Structure formats: C-alpha cells, structure tokens
Amino acid sequence: MAGSRSVGLLASTWASMVTMGRAGYRDRAAGIFATAAGLADVIRAHPELRLMGEPTFLVAFTSDALDIYHVNDALRQRGWRFNGLQYPNGLHLAVTGPQLQEGIVERFAADLSDALDYARAKAGTPAQSAALYGGVPGGLTPAATMFITAVMSQMMDAQQSVPTPA
C-alpha cells in the first residue's frame, strides 16, 4: 500500500469492484468506451475541430480555425466541464459514470454546435477560460517568466535556509 495513492482511494476502488462485480465493471467500461467513441464522432463531424490522439475513454480536441477556449466558455454555460490544455490549446474530458446518461452524445452534439457558433461570434476577443495546468495563458511571456522566477527563487531560499545561531 506504500506509494503516492491514498489508502482511502484504494478502499473505495475495492468497494466499487466488490459492489459492481466483474460483469458490472465490464458493462460500465463498455458504456464509457461507447460514449467516448460517440463524443469523438461528434467532434470529427466539425471540420474546424481536430481530435488529439486516438480516444478510448478520454476525448481531447483542438482547433486551428478558432479559439478553443471560447468553445469551452460556451460549453461551460451548458454544464459541460472540459479541462483546458496547452501546446496546442485544446480541451479534454475523461468519460466516466456521469457521462453515461441516456442521450448524452446527442446533447453534446447540439451543445458543441452552439459552442462553435459562439466561438465564431467571439473571434478576436479574449476568452474567459484558459489552460493553467502546467503553464500560463498565452505561454511564457517575459512578465510571466519574471514572476515565476521570483516566486521560485523565494520558495527555494525559504526551503533551503539555515536557522541563525541563537
């Protein structure tokens, strides 16, 4: 049980597996893969979007034609929670149990179409959302580089300081 995973997470995973059983787990997995494939098909139907990778249960996409973060803004307003990516800018969603609702792929198709219309209308304006995981919006500008350097230097100095003699 040693490692970076919480024992609570391990216990809840075990309880889920015992409760669902092998057949339940396989049914859930099949539903997740089918839903992810359906979402990927919806994305492929829009020429201005491009899938990233070969989805199994995680669907990631980008656009060379419009600001993908505007798409995220519009999808958020409809209750979708995609995570932002950078380099290239993109969105991703790990399909899990909540996405196994009846009609979710059809709902995504309608919401994505509306989100693309929204992104086209907002072209040239800054989006509300961005990807901050692993970076900063717009990349490492000189100002962002100076800020990160200052914070990291201060942190390293604090962590590696030696107490003064009494």
Image: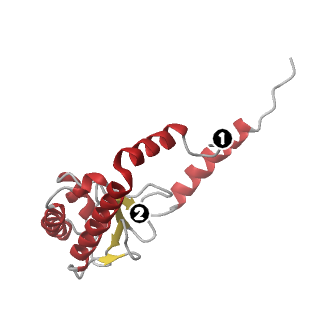
- Viewer-nearest of labels 1 and 2? 2
- Helix, strand or loop at label 1? It is helix
Q: Along the line of sight, which residue is nearer the eye, 71 or 137?
A: 71
Q: Quadrant of the C terminus?
A: top right
Q: Residue furthest bottom?
A: 47
Q: Position of residue 142 (x, y in %)?
A: 54, 60
Badge 1: how crowded within 10 Å, few (<14), some, or many (20+)?
A: few
| Amino acid of disc 1 | Met
Picture coordinates of residue 34 (x, y %)? Answer: 27, 69
Residue at 35% across / 63% down in the picture? 92
- In the foreground, 62 or 149: 62
Give percent across and percent down for residue 7.
54, 38
The residue drawn where x is 43% and y is 65% is 86
Residue type, mark 2 in image: Leu
Q: Position of residue 10 (x, y in %)?
A: 51, 43
From this view, report whether residue 128 is shown above or below residue 15: below
106 left or right, relative to 51: left
The residue at 17%/54% (across/down) is 78
Mark 2, Cα crowd under 10 Å, few <14 / some 14-19 / many 20+, is many
- At a point 60% along the width and 46% down the height, the residue shown is 4
Quarter of image, res 48? bottom left
Residue 147, placed above or below residue 102: above
**Circles 1 and 2: CB atoms closer than 8 Å:** no
Label 2 belongs to which residue? 85
The circle drawn on residue 155 is: 1
For residue 38, above or below residue 104: below
Q: How many marks?
A: 2
How far is mark 1 from mark 2, CA to CA? 26 Å
